[in-house]
Amino acid sequence: MAGLSLLTLLDDIASVLDDVALMSKVAAKKTAGVLGDDLALNAQQVTGIRAEREIPVVWSVAKGSFRNKLILVPAALLVSAFAPWLIMPVLLVGGLYLCYEGAEKVLEKYLPHHNQEKNESTHDSEILEGMPEDLIAFEKKKVKGAIRTDFILSLEIIVITLGIVQGHPQLTQIVVVSLIAFIMTCGVYGLVAGIVKLDDLGFYFQRKSEGKGALNFLGNSLVSTAPKLMKLLTVVGTVAMFLVGGGIIEHSIPAVHHFTEALFSPLSAQPILGSVFPYLLTGVLGLLAGAILVGIFTLFGLVKQRVFRR
């Protein structure tokens, strides 16, 4: 009798593990797009850091990301169990924040205020001169910004995973969501660490090759490619903010979703336009939402200044 109970228990465990493996595989595929956006955004956030501080900064952001997951995973599971209607509004607020942050970056780049430009120029020159207090403040600002952005993207990954495991036993949900959160965090920040150290790897190959052979060519290629890749990731990261934020807005507001579906349907037969246009429209939606939010907050700030001056 005891042996039969043990076999039944082992069979139940094997069944749960099979479900976990299957659900984790599906969730990994579904969240792969967000993983790419997460990678681009976080690589963008650590640009401008001194070479010797890149890995410590990436590690600080990774620790912040793990803290985000420790908060989000149990919170999302509880909300999913007791108040599932709350998930989409929270996700929508996160999407709007990403759009706002992306629009702010674009507007500051192309329409900088005189004082802002002057302050940024002064601040950058002080950083280059190596003032310790400015370097610490600069790093902290970068880390905080990256952790905030990671919070939104982590929430989206967890919500997507919850949607896949919905209806399965509670234990399967907990294990799959926790596993995906852990794997995604390790994957993203492992890749970010690799990207930011590409130039150092190139310098290492240059030293080892002593200026000759294929190893030297590889080293030179990495050294010349790394800065261009980081600049590209800065652009891709900003675009990803609009794509992720716009996608969340599109799927969270039924009226917007129906409107975009009506626009997509005539183009579905066109292979190129049908695949490119949805992303383009989602990005434009994110940019418009972000620009509106920047305008609202700017107007609010001006009104607040005038009120307090009186």
Image (spheres, grey):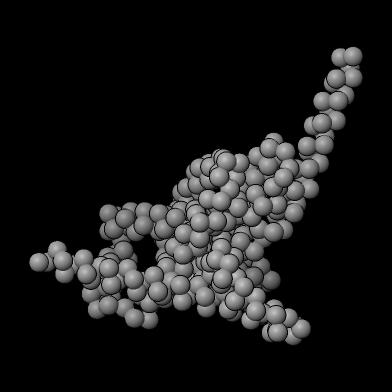
Would you place residue 41 above or below residue 179 in this image?
Answer: below
Taking depth in this image into account, of 7 and 185 the one nearest to the observer is: 7
- Residue 84 in percent (x, y) is at 58, 48
Q: Quadrant of residue 34?
A: bottom right
Q: Residue at x 70, y 52 (%)?
A: 164
- Residue 217 in percent (x, y) is at 64, 73
Residue closest to the far left: 310
Count of labels shown?
0
Taking depth in this image into account, of 120 and 205 the one nearest to the observer is: 120
Q: Quadrant of residue 134?
A: bottom left
Residue closest to the far front: 255
Quadrant of image for the C terminus: bottom left
The answer, for residue 303, to whether it is visible in the render is yes
Taking depth in this image into account, of 66 and 210 the one nearest to the observer is: 66
Q: Residue at x 44, y 63 (%)?
A: 97
The answer, for residue 187, to whether it is visible in the render is no
Would you place residue 80 above or below residue 101 in this image?
Answer: above
Would you place residue 124 above or below residue 170 in this image?
Answer: below
- Residue 11 in percent (x, y) is at 85, 30
Would you place residue 145 above or below residue 264 in this image?
Answer: above
- Residue 259 in percent (x, y) is at 59, 76
**Residue 60 falls left or right of residue 120:** right
**Residue 44 falls left or right of residue 187:** left
Q: Residue at x 56, y 72 (%)?
A: 256
Quadrant of image for the N terminus: top right
Q: Residue at x 27, y 77 (%)?
A: 113
